[in-house]
Image (spheres, rainbow, N blue to C red):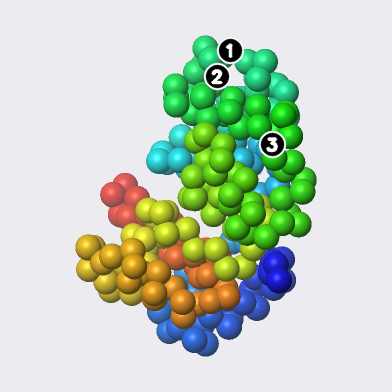
Amino acid sequence: MTRTFDEDEFYKICDRLFEIDSDLHSIYLKYGYPPFWSRKPNFETLIHIVLEQQVSLASAKAALDKLKKKIGIVTAKKIVLLSDLELRECYFSRQKTVYAKELAKAVLEKQIVISQLKDLPEETIRTRLTAIKGIGNWTVDIYLLMALHRTDIFPIGDLALLQSLKKVKRLPPQTSQERIRKLSEKWEPYRSIATMLFWHSYLEERKRRSKEKTS
């Protein structure tokens, strides 16, 4: 069965997680509930996530904003009409220019139908999306979690998640992904919401450090 969550359920699930994991509860006691991060389940969101691969959120947003200023609503048809130079002028790297065009081509050729993804099992979505050049498991995880709101996504390749989890759980930096994945079983079937709690802690810690530097 495909399990999803909405904003009301999000806070209830947070409360359930606090009952089973005191470390997650400590994030809430320190920083409150995380925001209900949500994105539209569309082509633009997939492009946005591709832009976020291995760069800061701010850099990716700057590129997306520049693109939207140039073409308005981001669609596959508009992307394929842009030259490589035009995408580079929107802060797309050479690699991400290729990825954006491959994704647009897959949509236009009906290799994927984005509006239908919400009704498919996670593994089918993963298989279809990762068949497109430039889309790996991390990109799929973020789309499943933030756009489709699947409840049990654990993006093991997400650096912010791993850094925050190791700090909150007091784990050594060299802790293996295998051990972390085993730890995550405690939060099933709500690992998406646990992930959002760790992201929340990561971002709040970063804000705090930034304030300390400027004070």
Residue 74: where, in percent of width, then height? 69, 30
Within 10 Å of disc 1 (Cα), the crowding (few <14, some 14-19, many 20+) is: few
Q: In which quadrant is the N terminus drawn?
A: bottom right
Which residue is more in the foreground, 117 or 87? Answer: 117
> Can you identify the residue that label 3 sits on?
111
Judge whether residue 179 can be spotted in this image: yes
Helix, strand or loop status at disc 2: helix
Residue at 48%, 50% in the rendered image = 138
Task: Give the distance between the C-alpha atoms of the residues marked 2 and 1, in whole angstroms.
Answer: 7 Å
Residue at 65%, 78% in the rendered image = 12
Helix, strand or loop status at disc 1: loop
Q: Earlier in the sequence, mark 1 or mark 3?
A: 1
Residue 125: where, in percent of width, then height? 64, 52
> Can you identify the residue that label 2 sits on?
87
Task: Give the distance between the C-alpha atoms of the residues marked 1 and 3, in whole angstroms.
Answer: 22 Å
Q: Earlier in the sequence, mark 3 or mark 2?
A: 2
Which label sits on residue 83? 1
Q: Is residue 182 above or below residue 208?
A: below
Judge whether residue 146 can be spotted in this image: no
Labels 1, 3: front one: 3
Helix, strand or loop status at disc 3: loop
Which three-letter amino acid code belongs to the residue tagged 2?
A: Leu
Residue 189: where, in percent of width, then height? 58, 75
Residue at 34%, 60% in the rendered image = 163
Which three-letter amino acid code belongs to the residue tagged 3?
A: Gln
Residue 207: where, in percent of width, then height? 40, 54
| Quadrant housing residue 90 | top right
Q: Are marks 1 and 3 in contact (CB under 8 Å)?
A: no
Within 10 Å of disc 3 (Cα), the crowding (few <14, some 14-19, many 20+) is: some
Q: Are marks 2 and 1 in contact (CB under 8 Å)?
A: yes
